[in-house]
Amino acid sequence: MRIEAPVVDVPDFDAVYRSDADPWRVRSSFYERRKLEIVLACLDRSTYATAWDPACGVGELAARLDARADRVLATDASAEAAQLSRTRNAELTGVEVVHHALPAPPPTGWSEFDLVALSEFFYYLTPEDRAAALTMINSVTADHAELISLHWRHKPHDAWLSGADAQTEICTQLQRDGWQPIVHHEDRDFVLDSFERSRGGQGGSSPPSSSDRGSR
């Protein structure tokens, strides 16, 4: 007996952002502000050369990453969201905002990312696009890159799977590709994991930069 694939009515995010410039209250709710601070606190290094926020939404995470990275690429599959993020980060010369959808590779001129942040979107991708996105990210990261992933742990009614299941899928594929876990954080309504990439599957952190070394 053939099992029918589920039908998922993923939102039209352009329409969502046209009707509300901050639909998830990222800029105003304490829950969202606290969540962003936890993401930043879980980053393993003080600074990065290049960072990528591939579902930037209204641009708040990208704005905060500007203080930690020399260059930040902020992209979103929604043109409306990309424009909101572009406005939010207009005065930050280290942030570039591009309308871009996963699993396509990043725009020309961007590669060898030291940090990738997957935040609150993976459950909206099809199973095929989720696998392809992780394979692509694996190919554009530096030898000792870091990846941090955070999702609302429940299942949105208009998504393919729950955030908890999305995190499990991400963690499973990353570890299969040789990434080593750094942080696992479970909150009441969200779950966060971070990993370090090590070519050839060898674990361990990269040597600290001069700014990370304390005086002795």
Image: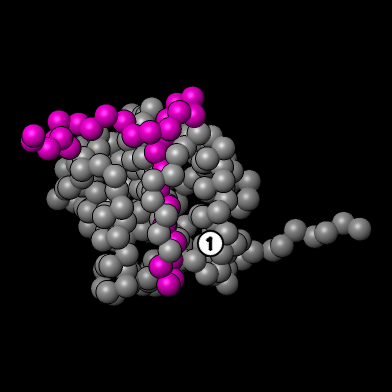
| Dominant secondary-structure state across the stretch colored magenta | loop
* Magenta residues (range): 187-216
Residue shown at the point (32%, 72%) measured from the top left? 31
Q: Is residue 17 in view from this perspective?
A: yes
* Color style of the picture: one colour
Q: Report the side of 191 relative to 40 (left or right).
A: right
The residue drawn where x is 56% and y is 42% is 173
Mark count: 1
Q: Please give left or right for residue 159 compared with residue 48 in the image.
A: right
- Estimate the x, y position of residue 130 in percent, counting from the top left: 56, 47
Image x and y of residue 10, in percent = 57, 63
Considering only vertical position in the picture, is 82 above or below 32?
above
139 is higher (above) or lower (below) than 158 = above
Horizontal arrangement in the rendering, residue 102 relative to residue 182 (left or right)? right
Picture quadrant of residue 19: bottom left
**Amino acid found under the numbered disc labelled 1:** Ala
Q: Is residue 76 visible?
A: no
Identify the residue at the far left of this view: 215
Q: Considering the image in quadrants, where does the N terminus appear?
A: bottom right
Which residue position holds label 1?
164
Farthest residue in the top direction? 200
Q: Is residue 188 inside the magenta stretch?
A: yes
Decide if residue 121 is on the left or right side of residue 21: right
Question: In terms of depth relative to the viewer, which is nearer, 93 or 138?
Answer: 138
Residue 184 located within the stretch drawn in magenta: no
Foreground residue among 4 and 100:
4
Q: Residue at x 20, y 31 (%)?
A: 209
Q: Position of residue 71 (x, y in %)?
A: 24, 38
Q: Position of residue 41 (x, y in %)?
A: 26, 55
